[in-house]
Image (cartoon, rainbow, N blue to C red):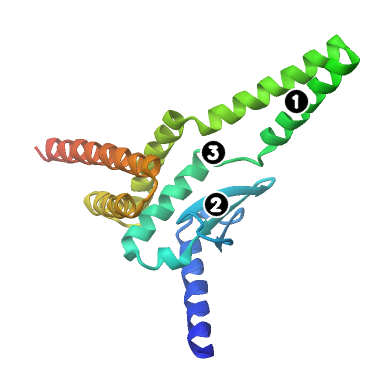
Amino acid sequence: MTSYATASARADLSELRRLKSLLPPELRSWVTIEASPGVNPPLITSEEIGKDQVEVQVDLAKWDALALDQRNLLFWHEVARIQNDTIPKDGWEMAALAIGLGGAVGELWVQDGLLLLLALGLCGVSGWRLYARNNGEKTLREAIEADEKAIALATRFGYSLPNAYKSLGSALKILVEQSKNKKERRRYELRLDALKKSAAKAKARSKGEAY
């Protein structure tokens, strides 16, 4: 049992090191890759953990069930999100919203009009930022853009364009099949549809260039 656990830990470390090697050189100094903590985490996600420092977290138990090429393209999707600066920031909005609401209630009590306006302004800014962050259409558009950039990254690392599309497409199909959340599944389906259209355009372009 101990030897199995040791072998599993070594395999996990090996995969994390392998993923690190798939980072573009310009990201390697400030992007780290770790196993996801907690219970039932996302397959792969990123978050800002400090100034100019991003951590990619991978659920290695689910990750190992995917083929190598599928893992690579999903990883490059996450890398693309980092490059596009579309990962969550430090989450100051919730704290600011709470402070603003608390301040607004307090200023209503003491009837200070200027401070009340300032508190309401803080609520408005933080509320808008939270809405923008969680806007479904915006996050879908960002995900599709990251898929496109992941394809480009794959070709940078030696993949042919058809194989890059095929690998990411098959990975998204698995995520569609495994997703139990209806909204999440729909998002994967829309990403897959956009990827198919992009692949068709790329194929048409390559045929045109051949003539």
Q: How many marks?
A: 3
Q: Which mark is residue 101?
A: 1
Mark earlier in primary sequence (2, 1)? 2
| Rendered view: 171 above or below 35 | above
Q: CA distance from mark 2 to mark 1?
A: 39 Å
Q: Which mark is residue 27?
A: 2
> Helix or strand or loop: what does disc 2 sit on?
helix
* Residue type at the position of mark 1: Leu
Whether pointer 1 and pointer 3 mark residues with C-beta atoms closer than 8 Å, the reply is: no
> Helix or strand or loop: what does disc 3 sit on?
loop
Q: Residue at x 88, y 12 (%)?
A: 111
Residue at the extreme top: 113
Q: Is residue 120 left or right of residue 20?
A: right
Tell which tag, 3 or 2, sits nearer the viewer.
3
Residue 23 coordinates in the image, percent (x, y):
48, 56
**Mark 3 — residue?**
85
Q: Residue at x 52, y 33 (%)?
A: 134
Tell me the quarter of the picture where residue 207 sits.
Answer: top left
Q: Residue at x 9, y 37 (%)?
A: 211
Mark earlier in primary sequence (1, 3)? 3
Mark earlier in primary sequence (3, 2)? 2
Q: Which mark is residue 191?
A: none
Residue 208 coordinates in the image, percent (x, y):
13, 35
| Rendered view: 46 above or below 71 | above
> Helix or strand or loop: what does disc 1 sit on?
helix
| Rendered view: 131 above or below 75 | above
* Residue type at the position of mark 3: Asp
Residue 6 coordinates in the image, percent (x, y):
53, 84
